Image: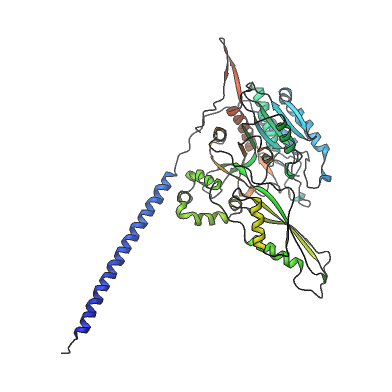
Amino acid sequence: MTQVSENFILPHCYQSSVLTLIITSLEYSFYLLLVTLLGVGLVVLTRTIMFTQKARTPRDVSFSGLDIHGAVQRLSQAIQFKTVSTQDQHGFNADEFRRQHAFIQESFPRVHQHLKREVINEFSLLYTWQGNDEKLKPVMFTSHLDVVPVEPGTEGDWEYPPFSGHITDTHVYGRGTMDVQCGVMGLLEAVEWLLEHGYKPARTIYLAFGHDEEVDGIEGAMKIAEVLERRGVELDYLLDEGLVIAHNLLSQKQEPVALVAIAEKGYLSLELSVESEGGHSSVPQGVTSIGILSGAIHKLESNPMAGHLSGIMRSTFETMAPRLPIPYRSAIANLWLFRKLFQNRLSAEPATNAAMRTTTATTIFDSGIKENLIPTQAKAVVNFRVHPHDTIEKVIAHVRKTVEDPRIKIRKLDGYIEPSPVSDTNCKYYKLLKVSIRQVFNDVSVSPSLMVGATDARHYTHLTKNIYRFLPIRSDASDLDRVHGTNERITIDNYADMIRFYIQMMRNTAVVLPRTDSHSTKVNLFGAGDTTA
């Protein structure tokens, strides 16, 4: 028999012990991993369940005697005025605005009997419905009289002529049906109905309609704001056009959500320019000015500013989460685990991506005059919509760092504006806004959000800290191209609900219905404390 040396047996035993130790350690690691995964799963499940709630049923409200047929006819007529705003004021048609003013006066006799009407800077309108209680601060509802032009050459793509105000069985078609003659007419219809039914304003109500919102509102809303400021007006809240009732925002199974913008992005345009050697195209001198500037633009568009899933956006999705499908609800309830995954999902969609970050868009590129002549200079305009997390100076610093080319000159163009302040969602008027929305649109939830475009509201920020931007229009992804695009339209049912919403918002916050019995006269004050819906 072969002798096995002791020197061999000892290492073998040692190896067995080490192997046993490794196996034991692996088993322990496996159990530890299993317990960790179970723990994480329990936390995820618990937080998801905590984000589940049942929507409260809003109280019933009445809108008896609301003349929907007449309102639709009046909206159709309003659409027929070509109150178009363009950057080139040579195309401004003053007569169309004056005809629109006359039509409004004729269409709403009670409004013009009981409210003070002022024409501001020739074409904007300010109405004052004087309140009974001077201790209550006034409120203001705003919209705008102007619309964007129809892109030349697209007129034939419309189902009906863009300024015809054509009425079908289900819709009204035309420029301004969504942005935003519906807001002007809807507010006036609401006040006309309230007057007809005997309502009185407990507090003063202003209706402000600028005439140049589509070109920054400098001559319209800004002038109205200056008038009110000189009079010492301080508002309790302001409601402007804004975000909408979004259908299928994240999922086909998602309930509609009313998005109320509590802030809006800032605005900045930068001109980038470069000069280089020109000459004949047959003997190029190197990289052309177009090539240099194109490279800079490519860098900017490929390196956007950082996105943010915090602040307003986090509030948006956390308030939306209880009525989302389980996968979304779980991700939002557990951002500590799924933040990166969820943020990537939002970044992939243009609408949600725009709400998360400062956006970059090259809107003008100008260079060259002849096909065989190398231009000596090139210019481009890059537009940024500045997120509340950023500032104009931060954007400019980002551009300089990203372009990193001393040949590129950067110039800030006029018309820039910082992001607006963020309005409080714990304010009673935001809560009453939620109530009013749910009382009319009882299938929706309500979430605060960010306005990615610009509105006239930015000109009134010194008059109140409570500014909310909401337009009660139902909309899905297919409607995005209609606003400022082709075949703009609104459903008749939706327009009726718009009027009802404005009525209810005023009833909840500003007007009262005097009641008389045989013993005394009592004022039935609005239920300012009821914010349960």
Residue closer to the observer: 220 or 76 = 220
**Above/below status of 87 relative to 291:** above
Locate residue 370 relative to residue 525 in the image: left or right.
right
Q: Residue furthest top?
A: 519
Q: Residue furthest left?
A: 1
- Residue 437 image offset from top left, x and y in percent: 57, 35
The residue shown at (57%, 45%) is: 247
- Residue 457 image offset from top left, x and y in percent: 67, 39
- Residue 311 image offset from top left, x and y in percent: 54, 46
Number of marks in picture? 0
**Above/below status of 267 relative to 141:** below
**Where, quadrant-wise, is the N terminus in this rendering?**
bottom left
- Residue 295 image offset from top left, x and y in percent: 69, 66
Q: What is the quadrant of residue 465 in the picture?
A: top right
Report if residue 471 is visible in the image.
no
**Above/below status of 293 relative to 147:** below
The residue shown at (60%, 31%) is: 505
Q: What is the quadrant of residue 116 in the picture?
A: top right
Q: Which residue lies furthest to the bottom in this view?
A: 1
Residue closer to the observer: 349 or 311 = 311
Report if residue 459 is visible in the image.
yes
Colouring rule applied to residues: rainbow
